[in-house]
Every structure is written in C-alpha cells, then in structure tokens.
Image: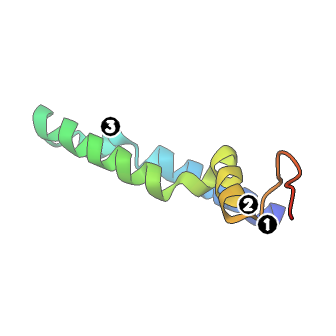
Amino acid sequence: MDPELRYSFQRNFQFLQRVFSMDTLVKPFPPAMGDYASHNLNFFTRIFSQFFDNEDIAAAQKSLGIGQEEKIRKVR
C-alpha cells in the first residue's frame, strides 16, 4: 500500500476518533441506554476499523496470504 495513502487513512481515522468519541455519542442517553449503546458502538467500530491498525493489517494480509510470512512454508 502506498505510504502516503496509509498515512492519510491513519490521520483521518485519528480525527474521526477524536470527533466521534464514545463519550460525545452516548452522553445524551440515560446511563443504562448509554452503556448498551457504548457496548454496541465499540463492537462495530472494532470490526470496521481493524484494517487501520498496523497489527491488524498484518494479520489480515497474513490470512489472505499476501503479507510477510513468519517462516518459510514447505510445499510438496
């Protein structure tokens, strides 16, 4: 992936994290509803943002077979 594109994604993601923090999104709700909404939002943000974290990018590349292998595979 192009380094400039990766940097742009990371910068935009950090901005969105600051603007749409869980505190600002669930503040207007009653406490019980806020906890429920916070739990669900954390789940969905983790799923959709996993490809912006370097470790998760490497894991996804490895599972697709396009990342750096940890060891050489033996092929018959």
Residue pictured at 40% horizontal, 49% vertical:
20
Pick whichever of labels 3 and 1 is earlier in the sequence: 1
Residue pictured at 23% horizontal, 39% vertical:
27
Count how many numbered circles sit on residues in the image.
3
Q: Is residue 69 left or right of residue 23?
A: right
Q: Is residue 12 above or below residue 34?
A: below
Which residue position holds label 1?
Answer: 1
Inspect the image, locate mark 2, and give the three-letter code of the amino acid beneath it. Arg
Marks 3/1: CA distance? Answer: 33 Å
Marks 2/3: CA distance? Answer: 27 Å
Image x and y of residue 38, in percent? 28, 41
Position of the N terminus by quadrant: bottom right
Image x and y of residue 69, in percent? 82, 52
The residue nearer to you, when weighing 50 against 62, is: 62
Inspect the image, locate mark 3, and give the three-letter code of the amino acid beneath it. Asp
How would you rate the neighbour count of disc 1 (Cα within 10 Å): few for under 14, some for 14-19, many for 20 or more? few
Which residue position holds label 2?
Answer: 6
The residue nearer to you, when weighing 16 against 74, is: 74
Foreground label between 3 and 1 = 1
- Is label 1 in a helix, a strand or a loop? loop
- Is label 3 in a helix, a strand or a loop? helix
Pick whichever of labels 2 and 3 is earlier in the sequence: 2
Residue 23: assigned label? 3
Residue pictured at 35% horizontal, 41% vertical:
22
Q: Quadrant of residue 75?
A: bottom right
